[in-house]
């Protein structure tokens, strides 16, 4: 599982991490912690560690970091905007765009 299949695996695995993030966000959305959502989010996050182990066996850590970072920025921004109806101000949009640009440059020269 080298090259493109490994990168695809990382992107899919990060979607699973996103699901865990979703439940952790729900857990902390109210005044009091919602233990059920916290436990689900925590369990999902812990299970993805096994996937990261396999991804790290087949990709250089620098390559893994670039694709993980890009997908994290995009996935979490989309989750916040489309699911939790969070609004991005101009500075946040510029920050996301700059982060993505910097990660593409890193991927290009890494």
Image (cartoon, rainbow, N blue to C red):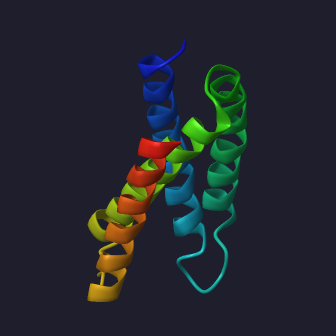
Residue drawn at (65%, 81%) of the image: 32
What's the residue at 59%, 62% (across, down)?
24
Residue 56, image x and y in percent? 68, 29
Residue 49's spot in the image, x, y percent?
A: 71, 37
In this view, 1 is above or below 61: above
Q: Residue furthest top?
A: 1
Q: Position of residue 95 (x, y in %)?
A: 38, 76
- Residue 48 in sight here: yes
Could you tell me residue 96's position as x and y percent? 37, 70
Camera-side residue of 34 and 82 = 82
The answer to whether one can see residue 79 in this image is no
Residue 55, image quadrant:
top right
Reply above or below: 95 against 68. Answer: below
Q: Is residue 90 left or right of residue 56?
A: left
Task: State which quarter of the image contains the N terminus.
Answer: top right
The residue closer to the viewer here, 84 or 40, is: 84
Q: Is residue 73 left or right of residue 90?
A: right
Say which of 22 and 32 sits in front.
Answer: 22
Give me the residue at 70% from left, 54% from top: 39
Identity of the residue drawn at 37% across and 60% down: 100
Q: Is 59 drawn above or below residue 47 in the view shown?
A: above
Label total for image: 0
């Amino acid at each position: 599982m080298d090259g493109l299949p490994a990168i695809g695996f990382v992107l899919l695995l990060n979607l699973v991490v996103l699901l865990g993030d979703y439940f952790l966000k729900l857990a902390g959305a109210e005044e009091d912690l919602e233990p059920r959502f916290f436990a689900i989010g925590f369990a999902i996050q812990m299970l993805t560690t096994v996937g990261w182990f396999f991804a790290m066996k087949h990709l250089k850590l620098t390559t893994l970091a670039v694709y993980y970072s890009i997908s994290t920025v995009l996935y979490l921004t989309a989750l916040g905007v489309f699911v939790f109806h969070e609004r991005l101000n101009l500075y946040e949009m510029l920050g996301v765009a700059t982060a993505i640009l910097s990660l593409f440059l890193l991927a290009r020269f890494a």
